[in-house]
Amino acid sequence: MKKKIVILVGMVLTVTLAILIFTLVIPEMNYEKVRNMEINNVDLEKVNDGTYNGKYTYGHYTYQVEVTVKNHEIKSIDVINGRVSEHAKAAEGVLDNILTEQKIDVDVVSGATTTSKALLKAVENALRE
């Protein structure tokens, strides 16, 4: 009986460890990649008037934006799809920075770096279509 309990406890611990690795460690490695990815500016003089859709996916999250350009200026950026969280809402501050600075390579929101980068890349992807 004791042997069965020891085996059962060992199996539970192994499964628990595997779940932690797959839910915490591996996604964190992906987050680091997103935090360090390069954001490339787009020459707005080459972007025609219109509305452009772009997205960026990392892990289980996809961020989709709609970017409106008129007279070679970014007029609006709307988040069409993304996470609903405090960090995600804070990260949307990068969109205001893009509108103010009229460039994509702007500073990220502290404390929401990964989501900020995902939104920036989605905007870049929209304007590169």
Image (tube, rainbow, N blue to C red):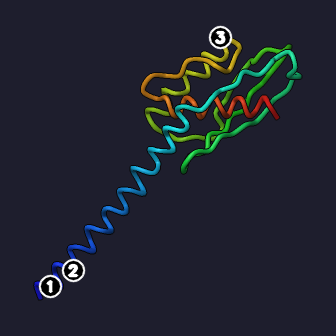
- In this rendering, the answer to whether 77 lies above or below 59 is above
- In this rendering, the answer to whether 38 lies above or below 74 is below
Between tags 2 and 3, which lies in front?
2
Marks 1/3: CA distance?
Answer: 67 Å
Residue drawn at x 47%, y 44% as measured from the top left: 29
The quadrant holding residue 69 is top right
The disc placed on residue 100 is: 3
Please report contact status of discs 2 and 1: CB closer than 8 Å, yes or no. Answer: yes
Q: Residue 11: where, in percent of width, then height?
A: 27, 74
Residue drawn at x 33%, y 68% as measured from the top left: 15
Q: Residue 81: where, in percent of width, then height?
A: 62, 41
The disc placed on residue 7 is: 2
The disc placed on residue 3 is: 1
Q: Amino acid at mark 2?
A: Ile
- SS at badge 3: helix
Q: Is residue 57 left or right of residue 74?
A: left
